[in-house]
Image (cartoon, rainbow, N blue to C red):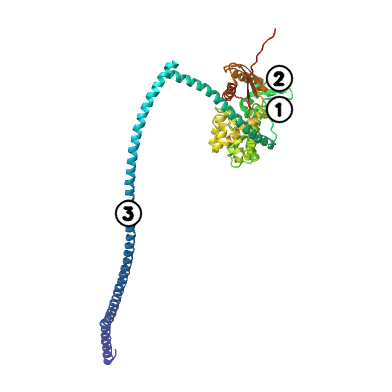
Amino acid sequence: MGSPLDIILIVVAALVGLGLGIMLVFIVPALKAKSASKKAEKIIRDAEIKAEHTVKSAQIDAKQVAYEMKLETEKELKERKAEYLVLDNKLSQREANIDRRDAQLITKENVLEEKTETLNRRLKEAERKEEVLQQKIDSIIQELEKVAQLSINEAREEIFQRVESKLSKEISAFIKNKEDEAKETAQEKARELIGLAINKYAQEVTTERTVSAVSLPSDEMKGRIIGREGRNIRSLEQLLGVDLIIDDTPEVITVSCFDPIRREIAKLTLERLIKDGRIQPGRIEEVVEKVKVEVDESIRKAGEDAAFKLGLPRINKELLTYVGRLKYRTSYGQNAYDHAMEVAYLAGIMAVELGLDQNLAKRAGLLHDIGKSMDFEIDGSHVEIGVRLAKKYGEPEVVINSIESHHGDVEPKFVISHLVAAADTLSAARPGARSETVENYIKRIEKLESLCKSYDGVYQSYAMQSGREVRVMVIPDKIDDLAAYKLARDIREKIENELTYPGQIKVSVIREYRAVETAK
């Protein structure tokens, strides 16, 4: 243990430490609180000073804004006052003008009233004079009826009959003179234009007939085509959709089908089978499929070639396929594809000479007979089918009208429609372009002659130049010169409406009067 002094020192140190601890616990926080309170008071005073400055600054700004608004308002009021003064002056001027016009209108009304009174007096005077004149006219008519022994209605009918008879001849003469004048100028111009077009068109166009016969190397091949119990020929007819006629004609098989494309496929299939020598159902089916693909490709290429040769852009590819189908279609022995190309070239050349759109004219010429590519598959004339196809593929109105008007079914609306019709006639009427069977030719000639004989005053008619001209003999006592001209026009219209014919038909009405006496 330590000494008592050490113990006392320890106790005293402990008490001193305890007192210092207590002092630190209570006095230091008190000092800190006092310091914080002073800082807070200083912050509050600073905030109050800033707020006071802010308020004063806001008051000064508000006064400045109010002053500026006052100046702006005063300026606007001055401008409004100036505008009101201008409007007031205008209103005053308008009132003065209205007053002046009102005075003028009153003056005019007075003048009109005076004129109206004058006109009324004159009307009454005219009515009185008209009554007097009517009385005199009635008395004159009564006297004329007594002298002529005719009533008014009878006299009117007599006058009408004489005027009608006289005017009928004058009208016919007038029409003849005008048409002669028009023909002199129009024919000269048309002849020049058509001659130029034909001269410029140098592409060779050939005609071809539909081939319906396939040559055989020998008659023995007929038996091989027929096959055992006819299985080969049945397979061919079923796959090709045609009728194969095998008769006594040596070394020939006839293909019969209304569809020219199927007929062409059948012809090519038979030729390949004959060349190959292997004729049996399996091989037949294989060759038929290959030929169909080749023909479809040929059709597509023909349509694209047509557009390329004519320089026609943006034609629907499906529509070009229908153009290619024309390659296997003929009309009166003329190939429809070549005919369409020829019409397109001629229409384009004439369009250039007239200053029209050449490509549009070529397009209309190429598609004018597009309906013939489908007329053996669906109902309707080739014109109706062609119009439906053109509308389906969005062709221009000019092309549609050219299709529907090139045979006169509707009136042409565009100059290009007339050019297409003219080019169609040129292509069909050129020598050697078309041909027909003897039976159809005889029927057409007989119908043409009988149509001309159906008119009163005609005693004979003759078809000349293979039906391209008809000469009509009339009875001179019934048909005079002007009536003969009218008869020719009537026959022409009836031929155009009732007959189907290639090219043009010239109508010549012949009137001859002979006086014959015999000296004895």
Extreme residue toward the top, this view: 520
Whether residue 227 appears in this view of the structure is: no
Mark-to-mark CA distance, 2 and 3: 114 Å
- The tag on residue 274 is 1
Instruction: Give how far across and how far down residue 124 sits, in percent.
Output: 34, 32
Residue 249 occupies which quadrant of the picture? top right
5 lies above or below 121:
below
* Of the image marks 1 and 2, the number of the one nearer the N terminus: 2
Cα distance between the residues tagged 1 and 3: 111 Å
The mark closer to the camera, 1 or 2, is 2
Please rate how many residues cluster around mark 1, counting C-alpha atoms within 10 Å: few if below 14, some from 14 to 19, many from 20.
some
In the rendering, at what x and y percent does residue 299 appear?
A: 63, 35
Which quarter of the rendering shows the N terminus?
bottom left
Out of 305 and 168, give the one closest to the viewer: 168
Instruction: Classify 10 Å Cα crowding around label 2: few (below 14), some (14-19), many (20 and above).
Output: few
> Would residue 179 be found to the left or right of residue 43 on screen?
right
Circle 3 is placed at which residue position?
A: 96
| Closer to viewer: mark 1 or mark 3 | 3
Task: Say the numbered circle drawn on residue 249.
Answer: 2
**SS category of the residue bearing label 3:** helix
Identity, as a three-letter code, of the amino acid under mark 2: Thr
Q: Secondary structure at mark 1?
A: helix
Q: What distance separates the C-alpha of mark 1 from that of mark 2?
A: 17 Å
- Dividing the picture into quadrants, the one containing residue 371 is top right
Q: Amino acid at mark 3?
A: Ala
On the image, the x and y values in percent for residue 37 come to 27, 79
User: Along the line of sight, which residue is nearer the eye, 489 or 235?
Assistant: 489
Disc with the residue nearer the chain's start (2 vs 3): 3
**Circle 2 or circle 3, nearest the eye:** 3
Residue 485, how many percent across, how many down?
Answer: 59, 23
